[in-house]
Amino acid sequence: MRPTREVQHFIYSQHFSNGLRITFGTLLPALLSFYLGNLNIGIIISLGALYTSFADTAGPVSHRRNAMIAAVVVIFFTALITKLLNPYPYFITIELFILCFLYAMLAVYGPRAAAVGTAGMLMIAVNMQDLRETGSILQHAGFMALGGIWYAVLSLAITQFRPYRLAQQELAENLHEVATFLRIKASFYELKTDTQESFKKLIDQQVKINERQHNLREILFKSKIIVKESTNIGRILLVVFSDLIDLFEQSMATQYDYKDIRNKFGHLPVYNEFKIIIIRLANELDNLSYFFATNKRPKPLHDLQADLVALKNILDESEGMSDENIFVLKKILINVRNLVNHIDRMYGYFGNKNVKSDISDLSKFVDRYDFDWSQFRNNLTLKSDYFRHALRFSIVMVMGFLIANSFEFGNHSYWNLLTIGVILKPGFSLSKKCIFQRLT
């Protein structure tokens, strides 16, 4: 991808638009309050907006709306309770343990509920110090909630204005990640590549793609406006995603003994040609990704069918150059041809004004999170990873609070609680990664 196109792709990406939305939604109340002469209130409102944005993760509109409403409720009551108990260190310690445990246990209901819990946990920390005087305790909690309501309204209004935009951006990210996966596959056809290292990269990339596909399934198959297929763009999103799933699964399922193939056929001209055409396939997916992100009609970069014909001719010529049976190379050619057909179909959808989706049963593509008490109760055991993490988290938060109160840290004693809330994750490797990021 050209440097200028990479910049454009980033500007149109989901990450950039999320950054703009959160920045605007968070800063506007503070700037407006500063202009009106009361910056303290503006900062409190902005904090409420910031913590509500945690729950605004990629997904269908109804789920995002419910999560942000839950975040506003959690923010209001957490701020109210914490402010009321601030003069009583004994009670604030009990509150810290109980609420941190409950908020951490929300993870049993999925990542979105966990984000709401994170907002609640950090809300305890920032309300332990009277950094800004905003009137009564009720007014303070009310301003926090007002910031959350403001952000929720802003986010949902943008979504209503451009209902397909989030799905387009997420599909563009999926296409880009699969393109990266194919480039790693192409590296197996280089004579000096460490195949073990390439396999490790392949597995890591597969994990990223699975996460992206999960997010996109949530957006596509739980959004009524897309599922109803009332417009051509909605149908294109569905069928391109379906083809991308097939392409990825086929490329993932076709694994060979690359070291053996390299030893037997690495000297043949066709060996390097496989790498070239797979890289071109990756370039085409990146090209589709760019045009999805920029909301334009894509144009192919290469004539892949002509490349297939040329590859077939080179393979036929190579058959007489080797003493080995080239049956495995013919299998690779068939797999490449199938990938080319998927990409050609993706391009073909954009010239068709009557695209039809044959995806009938959408329920099997999405996960369901049922918010019932039994699911929470069943995890109240040491055998549950969620329970152990919640218990560990609440204990560490209480220890951090007690240590902070044992020394004179001034008005910044809550910073250690914020740090604990940010870096302590259910998995040790993820916590270690967050520690290094936080230190940096």
Image: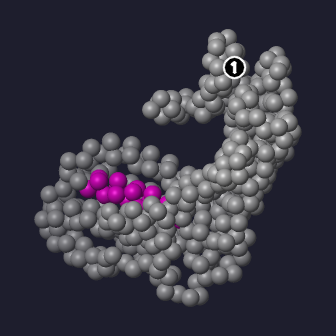
Q: Residue at x 46, y 63 (%)?
A: 11
376 relative to 316 in the view: left or right: right
Residue at far left of view: 321
State yes or no: residue 186 in magenta.
yes
Q: Secondary structure at mark 1?
A: helix
- Judged from this view, the residue extending furthest toward the bottom is 353
Pick the residue in front: 167 or 336: 167
Residue 1: quarter of image = bottom left
Q: Nearer the viewer, residue 78 or 361?
A: 78
In this rendering, is residue 284 above or below 59?
below
Identify the residue shown where x is 44% and y is 50%.
205
Report the number of discs.
1
The residue to which callout 1 is attached is: 401
User: For this rendering, which residue is in front, 358 or 51?
Assistant: 51
Which amino acid does the dot numbered 1 rest on? Phe
On the image, the x and y values in percent for residue 172 come to 50, 65
Position in image of residue 320 (x %, y %):
14, 68
Magenta residue span: 171-189
Tell me the quarter of the image containing the C terminus.
top left
> Image point 69% across, 15% down: which residue?
405
Please identify the dominant SS of the magenta region.
Answer: helix
